[in-house]
Image: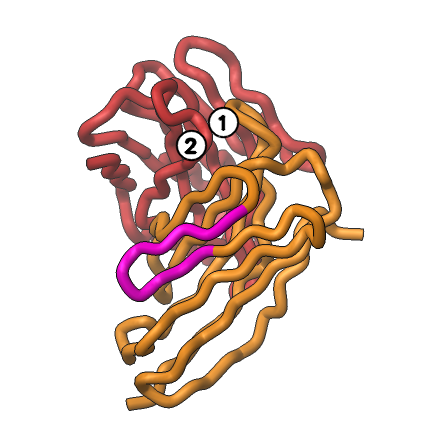
Chain colours: A red, B orange
């Protein structure tokens, strides 16, 4: 149980384009989803927290107009990187939390974004 | 001072060895402690979850929490090459609270 999927697993795009990453909880309803960014050999950096049906809460220093987050249902959240630039290249990971066991987070497999 | 400190390693051990991974923290409000395993280019996988102080065992893995010292450990017995991964500690003050992650310790188990 508690499986989270992400799509795509890998994406390469040109500078200036937008990229959408989907995060789905497959066998549970996720009241809260998180989006993280991870640089090589570094820990997870929380970007934003999203609750179903409400606006995402962004961490300090994360541009909400650049990283658009939508949590339209209890099983789906999307992260759109708008007008991507090479410095946005990174590993993006989502996680989901249930209301029942609200302490732990279950992570997706991650999406490797490369912006040329 | 970071909320959570973790030695990044790398740590290299022979197969069959006992591995000890540790994290220290500064916030005495933390009550929930997790260990995640992350293989290269994959998302973290929840290994162990502990509430408050004490020990928890699951197969070859044992998690220990010492709240008086603000110190948590993960022990891996009879380590296997398949245990080679990065291990992240994480902690939280309570349900609905933010997670704080360590930087991860890279472990290699040599056959």
Location of residue B8 with respect to B33 vertically, above or below: below
Pointer 1 indicates a residue of which chain?
A: A
Magenta segment main secondary structure: strand
**Quadrant for the N terminus of chain A in the image:** top left
> Are there few (<14), some (14-19), or many (20+) residues within 10 Å of tag 2?
many
Residue marked by disc 1: A68
**Front in this rendered view, residue A68 or A50:** A50
Mark 1 element type: strand
Give the left or right position of residue A28, taking residue A41 as reference. left
Residue B40 image point, x, y percent: 37, 66
**Front in this rendered view, residue A99 or A18:** A99
Residue marked by disc 2: A79
Give the left or right position of residue A46, taking residue B39 as reference. right
Q: Earlier in the sequence, mark 1 or mark 2?
A: 1
Residue A79 image point, x, y percent: 42, 32
Asked whether the residues under the numbered discs 1 and 2 touch, taking CB atoms below 8 Å apart as contact, a structural biologist would say yes
Residue A41 image point, x, y percent: 54, 66
- Residue B53, located in which quarter of the rendered image? top right
- Residue at horizontal 44 percent and vertical 67 percent from the top: B75
- Residue at horizontal 42 percent and vertical 44 percent from the top: B49
Q: Which residues are magenta?
A: B54-63
């Amino acid at each position: 149980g508690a499986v989270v999927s992400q799509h795509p697993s890998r994406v390469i795009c040109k500078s200036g384009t937008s990229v959408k990453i989907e995060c789905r909880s497959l066998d549970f309803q996720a009241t809260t989803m998180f989006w993280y960014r991870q640089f090589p050999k570094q820990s997870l950096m929380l970007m934003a927290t999203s609750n179903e049906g409400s606006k995402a809460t962004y961490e300090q220093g994360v541009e909400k107009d650049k990283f658009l987050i939508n949590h339209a249902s209890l099983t789906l959240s999307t992260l759109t990187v708008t007008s991507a630039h090479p410095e946005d290249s990174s590993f993006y990971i989502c996680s989901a939390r249930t209301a029942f066991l609200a302490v732990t987070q279950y992570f997706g497999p991650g999406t490797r974004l490369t912006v040329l | 001072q970071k909320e959570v400190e973790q030695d990044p390693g790398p740590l290299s051990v022979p197969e069959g060895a006992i591995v000890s991974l540790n994290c220290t923290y500064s916030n005495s409000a933390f009550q929930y402690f997790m260990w995640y395993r992350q293989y290269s280019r994959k998302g973290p996988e929840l290994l162990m979850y502990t509430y408050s102080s004490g020990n928890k065992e699951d197969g070859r893995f044992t998690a220990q929490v010492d709240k008086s010292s603000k110190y948590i450990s993960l022990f891996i017995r009879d380590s296997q090459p398949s245990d080679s991964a990065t291990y992240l500690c994480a902690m939280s003050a309570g349900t609905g609270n933010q997670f704080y992650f360590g930087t991860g310790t890279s472990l290699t188990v040599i056959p």
